[in-house]
Amino acid sequence: MPVAGPLDRFPLWLLLGVTIVVLLLAVEGGYRLGAYRVRRSEQEHGAHVLALVTTTMGLLALVLAFTFGLAATRFEGRKQMVVDEANAIETTYLRAGLLPGDRGANVRERLRDYVESRLEVVRLGNVEQALRRAEELHRELWKEAEAAARDQPSSTVVALFIESLNRMIELHAMRVKVAVRGGVPGVLWAALFTVAILNLAAVGYHAGMVRTRRSPTIGTLVLGLAIVLMLTADLDRPQEGALTVSQQAMIDLRRRIGD
């Protein structure tokens, strides 16, 4: 069963809007607290607070860079898995043509269905149904491989076909792990958003302490940070948002084996 990440249940546009509002509220809350504190106490100095704000900004940059790198690595892994799986399917398809009798034609027909099922999950977004269909086709293909092995236990051709089929099934499991179940951990998202909120609150707190007016540049900071956060979330999603993995390798394979 596919495991959705903590942010995958919400559209990116909604997450962007909520993130901007929350960060602006954090700045405003920090600003009011800073203004209140400076009226009540003269012991806290703006230079000291600024040093702490700079430190928290560095911490935010560290956590954000780590999360972005993790999401980007997953994105690159998904792209490579599409190419690897397409190559494995094509190899299995070609070797199936060497099987005796009608078995090769049956295997090739199932492989065509398999490629279609891989592309349907991108078009329709029904991951659960696609996984069930893939597992069903795996069982059917493996039954054909078992029958071929029983008929010709010492055949090199059958051995090569089983090897490529096994590789195809293995890559399917790896692709599911990378694309469906390998997202950025929820605890890391929670830490990132918590550090971002605290950092923006600290920025507002410092502004309130030094009695500066609410600068419009705070809006650019909030918007820029929110965009980077949403870009990271976009990278972490398999087939949703502005950054999606190209399925051209599978499309080209469907064209080649469609005859």
Image: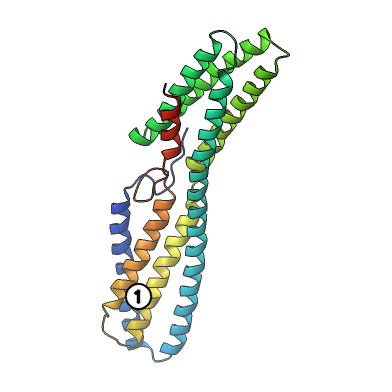
Report the side of 147 relative to 33 (left or right): right
Report the side of 88 relative to 49 (left or right): right
**Displayed quadrant of residue 159:** top right
Q: Nearer the viewer, residue 132 or 92?
A: 92
Q: How many marks?
A: 1
Task: Return the x and y of residue 198 as percentages of the image width and height.
Answer: 42, 69
Q: Nearer the viewer, residue 28 or 73?
A: 73
Q: Residue at x 38, y 72 (%)?
A: 200
* Residue 34 seen: yes
Task: Return the x and y of residue 77 as percentages of the image width and height.
Answer: 52, 46
Establish if 81 lies above or below 56. Answer: above
**Displayed quadrant of residue 151:** top right
Task: Return the x and y of residue 117 as percentages of the image width and height.
Answer: 42, 27
* Residue 26 seen: no
Task: Return the x and y of residue 140 as percentages of the image width and height.
Answer: 53, 16
Establish if 18 lies above or below 195. Answer: above
List the residue tagged with mark 1.
Answer: 30
Q: Residue at x 43, y 84 (%)?
A: 50
Instruction: Determine crowd level at label 1: few under 14, some 14-19, many 20+ residues with C-alpha closer than 10 A.
Output: many
Q: Type of residue at label 1?
A: Gly
Instruction: Determine the secondary structure under disc 1.
Output: helix
Q: Residue at x 30, y 63 (%)?
A: 20
Q: Nearer the viewer, residue 40 or 168?
A: 168
**Displayed quadrant of residue 201:** bottom left
Q: Residue at x 42, y 72 (%)?
A: 199
Q: Quadrant of the C terminus?
A: top left
